[in-house]
Amino acid sequence: MTAKSLQTNTINPQVMGILNVTPDSFSDGGKFASFDSALKQVEQMINDGVDIIDIGGESTRPGAVDVSEEDELARVIPLLKAIKARFDIKVSIDTSKAKVMSQAIAHGADIINDVRALQNTGCLAVLAQSDIPVCLMHMQGMPRTMQDNPHYDDVIDDIKQFFIERIKVCEQVGIKRDRIIIDPGFGFGKTLEQNYQLLAQLHQFAELELPLLSGTSRKSMIGNLLHRNVDERLAGSLTTAIIAAQQNASIIRVHDVKETVDALKVLSMTQKYQ
Ligand code: 7PJ
């Protein structure tokens, strides 16, 4: 699979289902921390129409503490192997650690999803030695402090510039442009206003001619706007998924696969009459 192949002209984004395996992952309370329940969750997501499973072994919610390499490997790799052995589904690994990336690639990961855009030591080299797609996400600051006082001259232009620079660095080490997916990183060092400005202007990233991933599911940008707890954010999450899809997002990263697949089907049905 090339990242480019994710780009389509009609509204038909791929749905990426979130499988958190961190004990403190904020929106499912660590419910899927055990191995068997994680596999059941994968099976359910497949039945619900998921295209990609995104496994994350490091919590990056605001204020989260760091996870050791050993712990992250132990959470992610056995699960990746089990999913690949049992199901025919694409798996993405949400990690910023070079060792986790290399092990994941060795065990059949289809995509590396890095909220730190390959800026940690060794990550560029690992990806350069493989040929799978990589998602470069924008984050301002680091998870522990990123929501303290985010600042941009122009949120769209600044993030666009960040992508241009990271893409250049990737290309310099031999990661071809057609393997790259970009993601503005909703909630990662952005105020409520900045998050909604980004969502409204997602189409502006089309200029970079790369597939775009949008991840807003159950995030604070929804909770803080609507004053809803994490388990009451479905309507808000679906609305943001539709807004992103209408601006040609190629991948929508969500917790609620079934509902998102339904919403996207309704949206795509209107397409042919436009
Ligand atoms: C994102 C992510 C996102 C990408 C997380 C959460 C926090 N990866 N990993 N984009 N968010 N690419 O799911 O709320 O927005 S972890």
Image: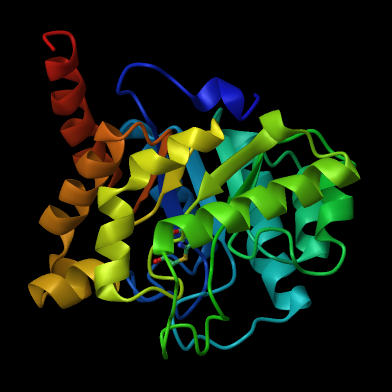
Look at the image and tell me in which quarter the N terminus lies.
top right
Observer able to see residue 254? yes
Q: Whole-percent x and y of residue 254?
A: 34, 50
Give the residue at x 49% y 50%: 39
Q: Residue at x 64, y 48 (%)?
A: 164
Residue 77, position in %: x, y? 71, 56
Q: Residue furthest top?
A: 272
Q: Decide: is 245 above or below 172.
A: above
Viewer-proximal residue among 209 and 32 = 209
- When asked about the image quadrant of residue 220, the answer is bottom left
Asked whether, in this view, residue 29 is left or right of residue 236, the answer is right
**Depth check, front residue: 247 or 224:** 247
Residue lying at the far front of the rendered structure? 153
Give the x, y percent position of residue 80. Answer: 65, 49
| Residue 257 vertical placement versus 158 (above, below) | above
Seen at 46% across and 44% down, the residue is: 213
* Total number of numbered discs in the rendering: 0
221 lies left or right of 119: left
Q: Which residue is at the front of the view, 27 or 185?
A: 185
x 31%, y 68%: residue: 194
Instruction: Judge left or right: residue 207 versus residue 224.
Output: right
Image quadrant holding the C terminus, namely top left
Q: Is residue 25 left or right of residue 230?
A: right
Is residue 44 shown to the viewer in this render? no
In the rendered view, how is the structure colored?
rainbow
The answer to whether 43 is drawn above or below residue 270 in the figure is below
From the top left corner, tell me how far across and down residue 249 is, in percent.
38, 36
